[in-house]
Amino acid sequence: DIDAGDMSITCVSDFDRRGVTLEEEVDVPFQSIELTVRCHGSAKQEDLDRLAIEVEKYCPLSKLFQQAGTKITTTWNPA
């Protein structure tokens, strides 16, 4: 029942490149990820806050990164 409309996502990460450059084995390559989700529908901020909680619970990529030890910060904004 939430009209988020089209979404655009900006991602900034703290990535430890030593693993991909074969310098050293790295347990958590992505130390942190900051996501900004901009929604272009009619949803108000309180609706987007509810949606953010549900997405975090069920998103397989979010779960994968969090279980690996990555700190994820997400901000949801109406357009």
Image (cartoon, rainbow, N blue to C red):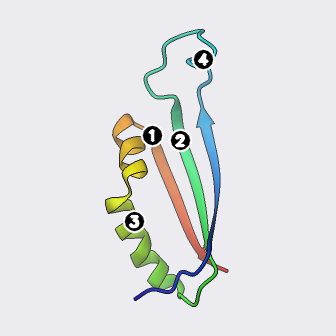
Q: Earlier in the sequence, mark 3 or mark 2?
A: 2
Q: CA distance from mark 4 to mark 2?
A: 15 Å
The numbered mark, 1 or 3, whose residue comes first in the sequence reads 3
- Mark 2 = which residue? 32
Q: Residue furthest top?
A: 23
C-alpha span from label 1 to label 3: 17 Å
Q: Which residue is mark 1?
A: 70
CA–CA distance between discs 3 and 2? Answer: 18 Å
Residue to which mark 4 is pinned: 18
The amino acid type of the residue labelled 2 equals Ser
Query: What whole-number distance in Å separates the C-alpha atoms at marks 3 and 4?
Result: 31 Å
The answer for how far apart the CA atoms under marks 4 and 1 are is 16 Å
Choose between 59 and 66: the one closer to the eye: 59
Q: Is residue 12 left or right of residue 32?
A: right
Residue 12 locus on image (x, y percent)? 65, 47
Residue 3 position (above or below residue 55): below
Who's the residue at 50% across and 86% down the image?
A: 3
Residue 77 image point, x, y percent: 60, 75
Relative vertical location of residue 67 with respect to residue 51 in this rendering, above or below: above
Q: Earlier in the sequence, mark 2 or mark 1?
A: 2
Determine the secondary structure under disc 3.
helix
> Callout 2: 10 Å neighbours few (<14), some, many (20+)?
some
Question: Which residue was labeled with disc 3?
Answer: 55
Secondary structure, mark 1, is: loop
Marks 2/1: CA–CA distance: 5 Å
Q: Residue at x 53, y 41 (%)?
A: 32
In the picture, the quarter occupied by the N terminus is: bottom left
